[in-house]
Image: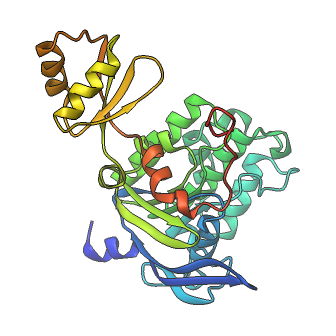
């Protein structure tokens, strides 16, 4: 792909700010979404993700700053569906239209050949229900139709808000495979999701925001590494004694219920050697990597506006 083609597939957000009255929804936000990557867009509810996507797509006007695709505002694109494919609302289709007629209308209004409708219906797995009214579609089918509309113009940039919402496990895997394959073709894929485990498998870059401000712009691996550290899970019938031995060697030890310890600052091999040297039986010794969800909660916890109340045993309801 040429340098000019790459530049045309870049989303640039610079100093983006949006106020609704006294509410600051997006606060001086700056980041890039580049081709060849699935860039995940994460943030707590109310963080400003949907507003940011609407600003990129020209559905709202910024109070300050800019959001461009290939250096141009979305509203100035001559043939937007050929350059940017987007889905923000899975149900934003007239319920009386069939899937085929909805896509055919989109194609006709953008100068896209009618044959492309059949192609995208096959890609998203809706060919067998193409003549069914969309008002009868499930949420998952609506999501597939939204993705079909986003792919209609074969664009170099995709902006997708929660595309896995409402899909069954097979559908979630299908979305993951599709997004990664589109990025591998050199497209810029910008996708929001609240499914952290799935985002860890799908995205290779992350934009994380909280209360409208940028919290992180990095790779998935770096985000997890920076936000928290791994630990070793140890289970022993002599957990209390083992904890004392490990602390004497400089380990960080947190006791869990029963016989379980979570150990940091020493690796699994060192723990095994200490236990063996003192005749302490081990029933479990596992290195546990921190998940994307745990890393996200640690980083974005202070930027969350709504928190669940803890139950009596300390768990979050």
| Res 141 → quadrant | top right
Instruction: Relative to 198, say whether 10 is above or below.
Output: below
Look at the image and tell me in which quarter the N terminus lies. bottom left
Residue furthest right as drawn: 96
Residue 90 location, x and y as percent? 71, 52
Image coords of residue 172 (percent x, y): 55, 36
Of the 4 image quadrants, the one containing the C terminus is: top right
Residue drawn at 64 percent across, 71 percent down:
51
- Number of labels in the image equals 0
> Vertical placement of 315 versus 134: above or below?
above
Q: Residue at x 29, y 54 (%)?
A: 222
Q: Nearer the viewer, residue 150 or 213?
A: 213
Q: Look at the image and tell me whether residue 235 can be seen.
A: no
Residue 10 lies left or right of residue 137; in this view the side is left
Instruction: Residue 142: give x, y in percent of width and height.
Output: 72, 45
* Outermost residue, bottom side: 64
Residue at left 26%, top 71%? 2
Instruction: From this view, report whether residue 47 is shown above or below residue 284.
Output: below
Which of these two is toward me, 23 or 193?
23
Instruction: Looking at the picture, tell me which residue is in the foreground, 15 or 215.
Output: 215
Quick check: 60 left or right of 11? right
Q: How is the image coloured?
A: rainbow
Which of the 4 quarters of the picture holds residue 94?
A: bottom right
Percent x, y for residue 196?
50, 44
- Position of residue 312 in the picture relative to residue 95 (left or right): left
Instruction: Tell me, yes or no, if residue 205 can be seen here.
Output: yes
């Amino acid at each position: 792909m040429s340098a000019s083609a790459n530049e045309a597939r870049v989303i640039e957000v610079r100093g983006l700010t949006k106020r609704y009255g006294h509410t600051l929804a997006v606060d001086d936000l700056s980041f890039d979404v580049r081709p060849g990557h699935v860039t995940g867009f994460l943030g707590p509810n109310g963080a400003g993700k949907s507003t940011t996507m609407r600003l990129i797509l020209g559905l709202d006007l910024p109070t300050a700053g800019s959001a461009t695709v290939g250096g141009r505002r979305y509203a100035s694109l001559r043939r937007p569906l050929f350059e940017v494919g987007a889905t923000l609302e899975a149900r934003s289709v007239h319920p009386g239209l069939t899937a085929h007629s909805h896509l055919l209308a989109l194609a006709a209004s953008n100068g896209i050949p009618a044959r492309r409708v059949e192609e995208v219906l096959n890609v998203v797995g809706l060919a067998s229900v193409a003549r069914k009214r969309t008002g009868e579609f499930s949420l998952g089918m609506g999501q597939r139709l939204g993705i079909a509309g986003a792919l209609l113009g074969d664009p170099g940039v995709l902006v997708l808000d929660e595309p896995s919402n409402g899909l069954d496990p097979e559908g979630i895997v299908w979305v993951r495979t599709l997004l990664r394959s589109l990025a591998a073709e050199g497209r810029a894929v910008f996708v929001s999701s609240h499914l952290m485990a799935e985002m860890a498998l799908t995205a290779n870059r992350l934009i994380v925001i909280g209360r409208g401000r940028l919290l992180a712009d990095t790779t998935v691996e770096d985000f997890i590494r920076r936000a928290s550290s791994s630990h070793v899970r140890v289970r022993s019938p002599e957990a209390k004694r083992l904890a004392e031995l490990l602390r004497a060697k400089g380990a960080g030890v947190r006791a869990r219920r029963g016989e379980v310890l979570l150990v940091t600052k020493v690796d699994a091999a060192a723990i095994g050697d200490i236990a063996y040297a003192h005749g302490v039986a081990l029933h479990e010794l596992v290195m546990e990597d921190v998940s994307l969800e745990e890393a996200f909660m640690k980083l974005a916890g202070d930027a969350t506006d709504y928190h669940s109340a803890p139950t009596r045993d300390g768990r979050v309801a």
